[in-house]
């Protein structure tokens, strides 16, 4: 059959139109899965629990975390550390917009409220009733959004050597290292996990997140070493995606 130039052009145009949605889907960004997670924590000789929640908002996410002593540890460690962060997706990665922290558990008890204004390039708020402000130069995380920024990057195959953390009034540069892949077993199950380590400049503390791809790269083990000694370890005991949490009773 003769292939007239006009027919061939129309077929090429049709193929291009059909390809566009497929190309867009292939390049679509993988988003975080809203969920709740529970961890069993050991800090030195003290026992505790860590709860985290990620909620989808109209234009981003809200994350919460709470850590408190459990069992006999409550005799010597009263209080909790409760933190929240609201953040959204930007071309650079996840950007925090508002962060709060109330620490009544540790000896460094502190209250922090920070807002991140990316248009003006300034972070400002109140730290222990004192006004605070600083300039923003590039992508900066708070203590909560840092974990979800790492998860988002893992989901989308993005590798970064450095992250910046606004830790109360101090800006920290965190060096990132891939600790490899291994099978880990926690109370919630066994997972193949990738280890991501971060360490601030001039600090002996190394934090390692063992992130399970099966759970959207949620950390199933969180470890902190200081001067080579394990100081904190959290293991996943329960996980519920938002669809399960919000499912109505029949």
Image (tube, rainbow, N blue to C red):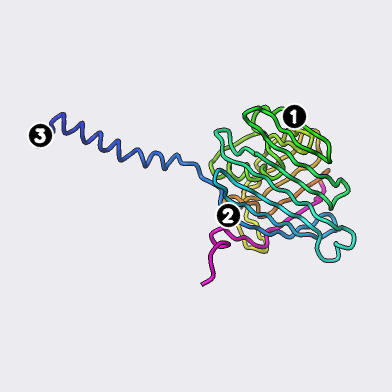
Residue 59: image location, x then y, percent: 55, 43
> Could you say which disc has been placed on residue 134 in the image?
1
Q: Which residue is mark 3?
A: 2
Q: Which of marks 3 and 1 precedes in the sequence?
A: 3
Expressed as whole percent of the image width and height from the top left, the position of residue 219 reads: 65, 51
Distance in Å between CA atoms under marks 2 and 1: 35 Å
Q: Is residue 46 magenta?
A: no
Say if the magenta span includes residue 240.
yes
Q: Splitting the image into 4 quarters, where does residue 90 fall?
A: top right
Residue 210 as seen in the image, left or right of residue 27: right
Residue under the point 81% across and 59% down: 69
Q: In what element is the residue under mark 1?
A: strand
Q: Nearer the viewer, residue 222 or 193?
A: 222
Where in the figure is residue 226, as x and y percent of width and height? 82, 45
Highlighted range, magenta: 229-250
The local crowd at label 1, few if under 14, some if 14 to 19, many if 20 or more residues have their Cα within 10 Å, is some
Displayed quadrant of residue 239 = bottom right
């Amino acid at each position: 059959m003769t292939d007239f130039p006009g027919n061939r052009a129309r077929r090429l145009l049709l193929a291009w139109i059909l390809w566009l949605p497929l190309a867009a889907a292939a390049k679509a960004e993988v988003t975080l899965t809203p969920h709740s997670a529970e961890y069993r924590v050991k800090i030195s000789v003290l026992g505790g629990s860590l709860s985290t929640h990620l909620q989808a908002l109209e234009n981003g996410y809200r994350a919460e975390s709470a850590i408190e002593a459990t069992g006999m540890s409550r005799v010597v460690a009263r209080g909790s550390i409760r933190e929240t962060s609201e953040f959204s997706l930007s071309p650079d990665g996840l950007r925090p917009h508002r962060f709060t922290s109330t620490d009544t558990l540790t000896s460094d008890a502190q209250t922090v409220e920070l807002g991140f204004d990316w248009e003006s390039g300034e972070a400002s708020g109140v730290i222990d009733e004192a006004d605070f402000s600083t300039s923003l130069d590039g992508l900066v995380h708070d203590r909560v959004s840092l974990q979800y920024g790492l998860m988002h990057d893992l989901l989308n195959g993005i590798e970064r050597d450095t992250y910046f953390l606004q830790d109360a009034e101090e800006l920290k540069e965190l060096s990132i290292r891939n600790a490899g892949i291994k099978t880990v077993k926690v109370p919630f199950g066994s997972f193949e996990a990738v280890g991501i380590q971060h360490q601030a400049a001039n600090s002996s503390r190394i934090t390692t997140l063992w992130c399970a791809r099966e759970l959207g790269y949620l950390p199933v083990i969180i470890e902190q070493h200081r001067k080579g000694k394990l100081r904190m370890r959290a293991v996943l005991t329960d996980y519920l995606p938002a669809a399960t949490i919000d499912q109505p009773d029949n």
